[in-house]
Image: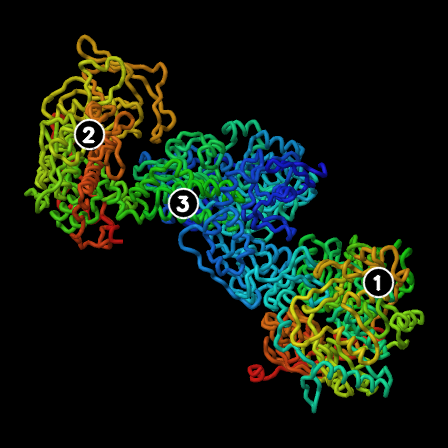
Amino acid sequence: MERLGSIGAFRKWQRELKRALDPKQTLITICGGTGCTAFGAPGVEQAFRDEIASRGLSQSVSVKRTGCHGFCEKGPVVVILPKGIFYPNVQIEDIGRIIDITVTGGKTIKDLLYVDPATGKRIARDHKVPFYARQQRAVFRLNGILDPTDLGDYVARDGYAAAAKALGAMTPEEVIDEVIAAGLRGRGGAGFPAGRKWQLCRQAPGDEKYLICNADEGDPGAFMDRSLLEGTPHAILEGMIIAAYAIGASRGIIYVRAEYPLAVENTKIALADARQAGLLGRDILGTGFDFDITIHKGAGAFVCGEETALIASLADSRGMPRPRPPFPAVRGHHDKPTNINNVETLANVPLIIRKGAAAYAAVGTEGSKGTKIFALAGKVNNTGLVEVPMGATLRQIVFDIGGGIPRGRKFKAAQMGGPSGGCVPAPYLDLPIDYDSLQEIGAIMGSGGLIVMDEATCMVDIARFFTEFVQSESCGKCTPCRVGTKQMLDILTRITEGRGELADIDRLEQLGEMIQQASLCGLGQTAPNPVLSTIRYFRHEYEAHIIEKRCPANACEALITTTCSSACPAHVNVPEYVGLIAEGRFADALNVIRRRNPFASVCGRACDHPCETFCRRGDLDAPVAIRHLKRFATDREKTPAAAPAWRGPRQGRVAIIGSGPTGLTAGYFLACMGRHVRVFEALEVVGGVLAVGIPEYRLPRDVIQRDIDYIRSAGVEIETGRRISSLQELRDEGFEAIFIATGTHQSVTLGIPGEDGDAVLDALKFLRQVNLGELTSLSGTVVVVGGGNAAIDSARTALRLGAEQVTLLYRRGREEMPAIRDEIEDAIVEGVRMHFLAAPTAIETGPDGRCAVTCCRMTLGDADASGRRRPVPVPDSETTVQADHVIVAIGQGPELEFFAENRSDDRLVVANGKWIQTHPVTQRSGAGDVFAGGDVVTGPATIVEAVAAGQKAAVAIDVFLGGKGELPPDTGFAPRTKPDEADADAPRQRIRHAPPGRRRGTFDEVLKGYSLRAARREARRCLRCDLE
Amino acid sequence: MPDNITLKIDGVDVTVQAGATVMDAARAAGIDIPHLCYDPDLSLPPTSSCRLCLVEVEGARTPVTSCSYAAADGMVVRTDTERIVEMRKMIIELLLSDHPHDCLTCERAGRCELQRYAYELGVQAPPGPTVPPQPVVDGPAVMYDPSKCILCGRCVQVCQDVQLSGAIDYHGRGFDTRIALPPGKTRRESACVECGNCIDVCPTGAMSFPGAERAGRTWELDKIATTCPYCGCGCTLVMHVRDNRIVQVTGDPALGPGKGLLCVKGRFGFDFVSHEARLTEPLIRRNGTLEPAGWDEALDLVADRFGRIKSAFGPDAIGGFASAKCTNEENYIFQKFMRAAIGTNNVDHCARLCHASTVAGLARAFGSGAMTNSIGDFEVADCVFVIGSNTTECHPIIGSAIKRAAVRRGMPLIVADPRAIELTEVAAIHMQQRNGTDVALINAMMHVILSEGLEDKAFIAERTEGFEELAKAVEPYTPELGEKITGVPADDIIRAARIYAQAGAASIVYSMGITQHTTGTDNVLSLANLAMLTGNVGKPGTGVNPLRGQNNVQGACDLGALPNVYPGYQKVDVPEVHAKFEAAWDATLSDKVGLTIVEMIHAMHAGTLKALYVMGENPMLSDPNVNHVEEALKAVDFLVVQDIFLTETAQLADVVLPAMAFAEKVGTFTNTERRIQRLAVVVDPPGSARLDWEITCDLARRMGCEMSYADAAAIEGDIASVSPIYGGITYDRLGEPGSEGLQWPCPDADHPGTPFLHKGAFARGLGKFHPVRFIEAKELPDQEYPILLSTGRILQHFHTGTMSRRSDVLDTLVPAGAIEIHPADAERIGAQDGQMVRVASRRGEIEVAACVTGRVAPGTAFMAFHYNEAPANRLTIDALDPIAKIPEYKVCAVKVEALAAAATAEA
């Protein structure tokens, strides 16, 4: 084309191009970004072109290769305009259908459409896909639309209008003022105000100045700069022209890493086209302003994010930072005043100039304006580039746009700001993200790397991983960074290998603070962030590694056997018994289970199975159904086996208070270790919460009895109907050690008026009465208040007792419910109505005995310490629900009176006024011979956690009594199944449920067991990670 | 900005100049802030890598490094808060965690800065496994132990930004970062010049000299400063001595023109002093072999033979070669002996072979034949024009100063040299002229300057004469003609002329490439013309600067070891001068100009010169057409050689007299910038070796001429009394050995010395332009001898190798000579790199290894003359410059033939 000699000529050309745009034209856009290209986009594009040509559609349909759409994991991405039909993961064999059905037929092809992982629904239009719909794309808005190699395409969409405006109608000072007013802050990391930076460079003496676009993008997780250069290179050039004009620079350099060949290629084309059009070079658009840009391909190093290191690298020296001042604005490239902005910053500039500072600054927070692009990755359903306004919350990014965490795991934290950023834990999910808020909580914006971590991510290991990265990327120049980060890495490695000491945490903090304060450049100053922020928020994980030699996330290889066994609080050797089941050796399998967990039958039904959450098979399709397999093994046992009996005299008398799973487990193992054990149970029925808390349809009585019989067979004596009122009384009886495992049998009250009415029941009491056969029917409508397992159990029990209608009120949303997920689903299937975001504020019992429950509507506020959103009452939103019965199930605690009697003389420390405090490993209390464990120490926990607590206590008490505290060996049955025999294709075997329609009025068990064939098939799905 | 700023450091008010750093201010206040990476002596921007010098500045968010942080008025600084001290301790702890705890055996113990700060801060070596030392001995000069390296980067700075070799750099990243040579390269293959300056700047034992291992702990070593015996730079060496043996040499940033920088020779070429082959007693030839004798016997024999020859054939039948390696005092005594005791002016020395044309040319043009300006001037020059000087190899300290100016200041450097020497790498222009065409090149440059009106008209008018003749003479030398003669593209000539003429202060640097021609004097005159034409004389950063090749060649000339002048360039044939010296020395002196070196050789050949007294010279290797020299020396009746080794020349002598080496003497050297510097007695002499001047005085006495001095200082007094340019020189004024001394002219006791000559007026009054016409070299390549051979020096060796070849490090580095030939010529003759070749000229032939390199132009070759195994001077021509009588070492014709592989293998 001809060189545009004036701004008028440019505007005329732009008008012509705009007129030529046809919004109705059928256009197939294929993403040409690096991600989609790697997935095969060029082949798809060629196939489209060939097919269209062969069908003679070339006149009416065009094909365009665009820049990156940002949804890289779904590549190759194809969008068919004007309707915006969105096809992810397009394969060459789909193309014929797409042309026939969608392009010419105007219909969507259902099986090719995008499936929302959150809802499972298929979505046809790109702007309806949640990943896109919830974003606010400004900088990125043209990326999936433009042909990056076509200058006209950019100009037709207002491209270079901002440059024309700046050069034609604004003074450099006005441009700077505008950018300052817009509040644009550097997107490369530190967030320094861009306009202010320009001003410093403009004011620096010297007639030769440089403008450098930093496209080095050292953060390994971030790729927004690459995508922008690939997709809209002209926007960067336009930003540079404006910046150069403002600064008074005549030379520009794009420092781009050589590993970005497509970005380099597209930028080269853009430079040549812009130069030819008179938008670069001498006398740009006839304004007398001279500016040209060259490309410098760098080898790319993380440290080149530091401006002075980048400048050194530009001079072909080793990329090493130097002390500042002098700042590059005064002495930079070739010792001349130099301004460096990163790609994303420069891409924002045309937006500011074109629309004005006020419009730009309308988006964002007080201190951070505009939008920010994040590279969303890690344990999140949708990964890719995400542009949101400054001030968006992590929850919006991770859950609304990212579609939440795969496999239903919990969100633990997000690493923000790249390898030298910090982790942002769940309580900050609702924090509006900007430069300042992140800084405050120990993270940084960085270039926008955002890595989501779930509960299977070990925070110590992640800190070690990032430290390893920054250590290996340290330029080696300054001592704190070079040696200090190495020492941190050594310590972290030691901790993750179970060789840490408590003093290591202090040392890490000392080193970290020193490195932050004393390092020469930003790399070192931020390098300790991952460590310091994980210590700040996840100190308990460090302590678990150090004190308990345990990795809570089951990730540190040195500390785990297999993820499933490690995830099991009782550390049952899962792969071994699953392997035995696969071979049909069911008795051996049961034996393996019982070596760690005497409640095999109970846990086969009512366990919350964390083993499955961490099962590696779950990363492929679905986790092995470990719990069902366990149940299967117990169901196969026709004649109850006896526990391995202690041969020889028993020594050491142990009293155990409470016959729940904790107490009986402790008793079982102590008996196996040759101790004389007596369990005291206040009720007449043995089993604690198992017997009186969990409804029969989940856990039939004979199943509980089977496990209790087994435990008794080990030599455990159980005395029922005896409530211990004084520990001294036990000592007087000759017990040398006492284990308190009394659980939590006291309900928490709502604390609202009318709670003490006759029709208001407390869930524990209600369930106990039902389980003991004291209450056999219920009629009318029932309102259950609460969202935990007790609430669900109460609701489903009420239905079975004959209630016509059961409504559950929960003050948060379904996502936040703590109850076991399957149970919630079953409750709904059975007809329990759920009212979320509703909390009772008063209960009025009428003269007819019916209750009027006044509820307040709640809304969810910011995350609390658990990361769940806090319910906040909506003013004036009260409604009233009528009910014949109200069951309150909002929490439970231990019976405080018991402790009150003994606290003073037995030095039992009670934390929070509630729980007994014990040593985390030995479970020993302040009173030397008294141990405590289970719910009474931790608060309500799961059955398997109760078993684990009993197991730990048994070990500790045995040691206390002079034994070795050895549990029976849990291996040695040697299943012959090998990992390569794993049934790779078999889907998870389904288990049968009782039909929902037949569940009312009966307490028959809902879940039915596996058939032999299904069980063995399921067992063969195990990958046998233990043999790796 | 105020000139002075006041800040408070640790509660103390300090006033410093604006621009000072906090560290500077703290030093001014007497507060020592620990630092490891910062070396103020390097005068480089701080790297701030060790982070030990962190201080707290009120209002700053984090601590700042005081080495880099600018002091400001009103600033409040604390250097000693608990936080800062804790950080420093932690940093030392970190460094120690990655450092061998081997202070018991580490050579640096006692002067290790890491050890010092660990001690001062009370930091214990952290527990845990220690890093074992991992010394890498890569050649004889520098040993690097990465385990001891704290990566302070001083060595990288000195290598890259001071020495400008750029051999070492950081490699790798993170904890594995190392200072290293480029991967896969040995030290010899790298750009390393083995200057060893990295050893001096290293704060720990990471960089060390392997030769000093277990030779003594720092507190057991005497450290004695003295002046370097090699080239004319005159660097100060600090010699570390134990048990009368020099163990190591280091530089001292406070001393000498190199400001602590040394080159490979100065630093490592010291062990010849204690070499077992040193002469320890006089030798007398009996029955054809040299046998030990007593001093009396030897000196009596010499006095007797000289006396008899003198009476039989007259005093002019005896000649003397003085020495550019000996002190000023010794040269003074030697020439006085020849003139007063013998009665002849037949005294000369090897300045004849290097800078006779300088003395002749510059004296004619300016009135004084010495380097006009000082070494320090390269820091202020706006342009340097180097012609015929391989500065980085022959004057390494000056070479690196010029490189620094070019690289660090961006000063345009113009290099004219037939070879692509190292300086061309940083030059703005390299004019690769054909050997021997300098006059045409310079005339063409002047043609451009005049035709473009770039000459300094005021300077020409006020300070010079003869301009018209010059203008006329250069008229025909258009750049095109220049190109035709020299082979340098006309455009380059034009560009070079413009850069030189338009620079504010432009300096010309030259050396043997200009002087060692039959047109040597013409070449020098041309350069003088060029400088005067552009007004580049008499100001700092300008001048015509011949670089003198030997440590005291300037002094030997100054002190009259020349056949035509008495000390201080006072002509023997001027009657008043003659009378003055007869009176001063109380002797009858000859008023006839004596013979030059080559003339004496011819005279010996011809039989007219019967006896020769050689002090510290080795014409058997240094003089052209050595075969001819050998015949001459054999023809002479009586040959006396006074030296420290039995040189090739001494082996022919009738009497050999053992002398002391520089490290054993008191005396002075005058370096290339006319700087007179003292020597120190570092070690005792071997055997009965004596001071040269004592030997000569003893000899004079035995010949009936009383020459007796109490010590060297007394001789200096004598010199000052007869030589006005040394008139103000006394040992007291020169200061301690190794200190900066004084630059002549220094006519009286109050004169501060002269950093640059010809300020305001030339020594001769007006500067004189000499029109010079281009003349070809004497012997050009032809069919039979198709290759043009040029000779010179290499970095690692010196002159005839008497010293450098007897220094372990230097001789290990480059143990054998080689002839540089262009790949095209090598291919033509079928020689591979490293293969032995036979090189022959009309005068002789030698066998030597070929070094195939693009550094030389096609059709040309280059050889160093240091090696007696392959003496280049068997090939060179003894054609002389008619005025200066300097031989044309730089151009002769040779042929080169490849030898069979067997010969190569044998060799």
> Badge 1: few (under 14), some or many (20 or more) residues near its Cα, within 10 Å?
many
| Residue that numbered label 1 is attached to | B725
For marks 2 and 3 on the same chain, the one whose residue lies earlier in the sequence: 3
Determine which quarter of the picture holds residue A135.
top left
In the rendered image, the residue lying farthest to the top is: A847
Q: Secondary structure at mark 3?
A: loop
| Residue that numbered label 3 is attached to | A75
Q: Which mark is residue A743?
A: 2
- Subunit ID for the residue under disc 1: B
- Subunit ID for the residue under disc 3: A
In the rendered image, the residue lying farthest to the right is: B575
Q: Secondary structure at mark 1?
A: helix
- Residue B559 percent across, percent down from the top left: 81, 69
Q: For the residue marked with disc 2, what is the amino acid?
A: Gly
- Residue A629 percent across, percent down from the top left: 17, 43
Determine which quarter of the picture holds residue A374.
top left
Q: Answer left or right for B528 relative to A320.
A: right
| Residue A460, above or below A119 | below
Q: For the residue marked with disc 3, what is the amino acid?
A: Gly
**Mark 1 to mark 2: distance in Å?**
108 Å
Which residue lies at the image location 51% right of the left edge and 51% below the top edge? A476
Cβ atoms at labels 1 and 2 below 8 Å apart: no
Q: For the residue marked with disc 1, what is the amino acid?
A: Ile
**Mark 2 to mark 3: distance in Å?**
53 Å
| Residue B247, above or below B100 | below
**Mark 3 to mark 1: distance in Å?**
87 Å
Q: Answer left or right for B268 relative to A711.
A: right
Q: Residue A62 or B340: which is nearer the viewer?
A: B340
Nearer to us of marks 3 and 1 is 1
Rendering colour mode: rainbow
- Residue B679 percent across, percent down from the top left: 71, 65
